[in-house]
Amino acid sequence: MGDMGLMFYYLVVTLFSFFVVGPCILNTISLFGVQKRFAKAMVEEGVITQEAVDRIHPKKQIAGVVISVVVTAALIYLAYRTAPIGYLCAGIAQIASIMKYYRVAQYNSLTVKRFRNTYENELDTKKFNQFVNKNF
C-alpha cells in the first residue's frame, strides 16, 4: 500500500472510530442506565405500561450490545492491521468521540426524544407532554 493509500486507511479508521463506534458504545451504555431509569419514571407517572417496557426495552438492549460488539470488533481489526499507528488513530478518535458525544449517556432532552421514538405507539401523549414540560 502506498503512502497515500495508507493515509486514507488511517483516515477511515479515525472517522469510523469517531462517528460510528463512539456514539454506538455510548448509546448502548445509555440503554442500561439513563433510558432504563427514564422508562421506570414513565411507568410511575402512568405514561406507559410496565408490559410495554418489558416487551420493548430488552430487545433494544440486546440489539445495542450486539451492534456495539460488532462495530468495536471491526474497529479493533482495522486498527490491528496497521498497528501501532492504527491503534493510535482509533484510540485518539475514540477519546475525542466520547468527549463530544457524552451527552448521549446523560439524562437530558435527548433522552426524552429517544424515549418518544422508542415508545411512540405505546405512550399516553398528554401525560408524557405534561411530564416533559414540568421537568425539562
Image (spheres, rainbow, N blue to C red):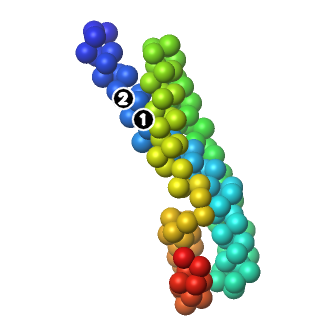
Residue toward you, 66 or 112:
112
Q: Position of residue 30 (x, y in %)?
A: 62, 55
Say which quadrant the C terminus sits in. bottom right
Residue toward you, 109 or 64:
109
Residue under the image location 66 percent in, 69 percent down: 38
Q: What is the count of numbered marks?
A: 2
Q: Position of residue 131 (x, y in %)?
A: 60, 83
Q: Seen in the image, is 37 located left or right of residue 28?
A: right
What residue did someone put label 1 on?
16
Q: CA distance from mark 1 to mark 2?
A: 6 Å
Q: Position of residue 97 (x, y in %)?
A: 47, 41
Residue toward you, 62 or 32:
32
Q: Position of residue 121 (x, y in %)?
A: 54, 78
Tell me, yes or no, if residue 49 can be seen here. Answer: no
| Dots 1, 2 in contact, CB < 8 A | yes
User: From the viewer's perspective, is residue 134 above or below residue 21?
Assistant: below
Within 10 Å of disc 2 (Cα), the crowding (few <14, some 14-19, many 20+) is some
**Given the image, on which type of amino acid does mark 2 rest?**
Val
Tell me, yes or no, if residue 12 can be seen here. Answer: yes
User: From the viewer's perspective, is residue 128 above or below residue 92?
Assistant: below
Residue under the image location 54 percent in, 25 percent down: 76
What residue did someone put label 2 on?
12
Instruction: State which quadrant residue 127 falls in.
Output: bottom right
Name the residue at the top extreme: 2
Name the residue at the left extreme: 4
Residue under the image location 61 percent in, 50 percent down: 28
**Given the image, on which type of amino acid does mark 1 rest?**
Phe
User: From the viewer's perspective, is residue 83 above or below residue 123?
Assistant: above
Residue under the image location 69 percent in, 57 percent down: 33
Q: Secondary structure at mark 1?
A: helix
Q: Secondary structure at mark 2?
A: helix
